[in-house]
Amino acid sequence: MGKEQYISLIAKQLGDELNTSELRELNGWLSGNSANADIKSDFQHIWESVSSYKAAESFDSSSAFEKFSKKYDLSESAPKIAPISVGASGQSASYFRKLAIAATAIALFLGGYFLSQKINPTFSNKTMAALPISLSQNASATLKPNTSLRYNSKKSKISSLNGGAYFNLSNIDDSEPISFDVAKAAFTASNAKLNIENYEGQDIVADVEEGSVSVKVNNKEVLVKSGEKFILSKDNNSFTVMESNSSNAFSWSKGILSFDNTPLYQVFDDIEKFYGIEITVTDDSSLEDSHLTTAVNFKPKTLEECLDVVQTMIPMNISSPDGDRTKWEVSKIQETN
């Protein structure tokens, strides 16, 4: 194993990413030469300096290398660090010194990455079901399929949300609210439960189940209360607050689909987001004229079971021509009104 790989192991150890076998390998390297322990000490000092930047969003490896190079004179007359193993090649100590510095720059980049991930973890859901996650000791979220979320733990801030997520912030104190940056809307919430959807090409929608949420858009601020819905138009950035009437706004996070006299286009939209699939109507059937008039509140075991229930209530053809469970086609919908 080369020196740069050992320095990478040091970075992983400081980032709590080292497994048992790697720790054993690193300890053997450190005990094999006193110069190796000095390298670790130097690197740990730099790591701790980097860690002092609380709001680190990224790490500039080029800048890190430049600063490290200035700290250690790279001229041939500079004091040399003894190489770990010169071997039969007879390469000079200065070569290994330069190699160590380059390897340290690489490790610093890894260290910056690990630090950034610890401060700003990114969560994503690639499954076909709701995914519960923990944001902090007092805050949790549930992600819809095809959803990603980035959370800055130092600032208690959702710095990005793409897709849909349900947030349980009922244990968050008013003195330390969680903030959200979602497109052109800034949300602030504590002691609340809410559902936010931010899908490409669609309006941003926030349904508040409990508590209240402050929303700021275009220097205007509005308070959205329990039972209300906030809608930000993607076309003209105008917003409105209205009564929340979506039965699926919160139940989906528990794996439940709810419909009550729901337009069929809304049924398909909810199923698409619930499973992370795509449903295409291939004929001239009118979605506007069709509703699920009978109340439905069920927890489907599979996607196929869900589609079968819809097909039973409103006769239609549903198929996946290519056998791809993420793409479905609907045709011959019988009108219900």
Image (tube, rainbow, N blue to C red):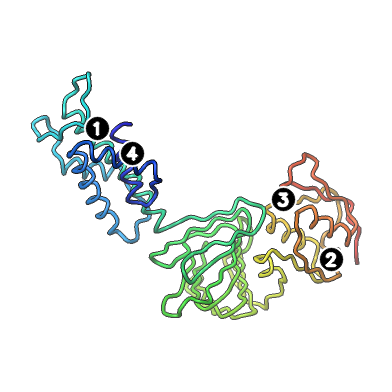
> Is 196 situated left or right of 243 in this image?
left
Numbered circle sitting on residue 278: 3
- The amino acid marked with disc number 4 is Glu
Q: Which quadrant: the N terminus?
A: top left
Tag nearer the camera, 3 or 1: 1
Q: Which residue is mark 4?
A: 25
Residue 260 in the image, given as x and y percentages of width and height: 80, 71
Residue 298 image-quadrant placement: bottom right
The answer for how far apart the CA atoms under marks 2 and 1 are is 69 Å
Q: Which residue is mark 2?
A: 291
Check disc 2 and report its element: helix, strand or loop.
strand
**What's the residue at 19%, 22% (across, down)?**
91
Numbered circle sitting on residue 99: 1
> Is 33 situated left or right of 203 in this image?
left
The answer for how far apart the CA atoms under marks 3 and 2 are is 20 Å
- The amino acid marked with disc number 1 is Leu
Residue 207 in the image, given as x and y percentages of width and height: 62, 72
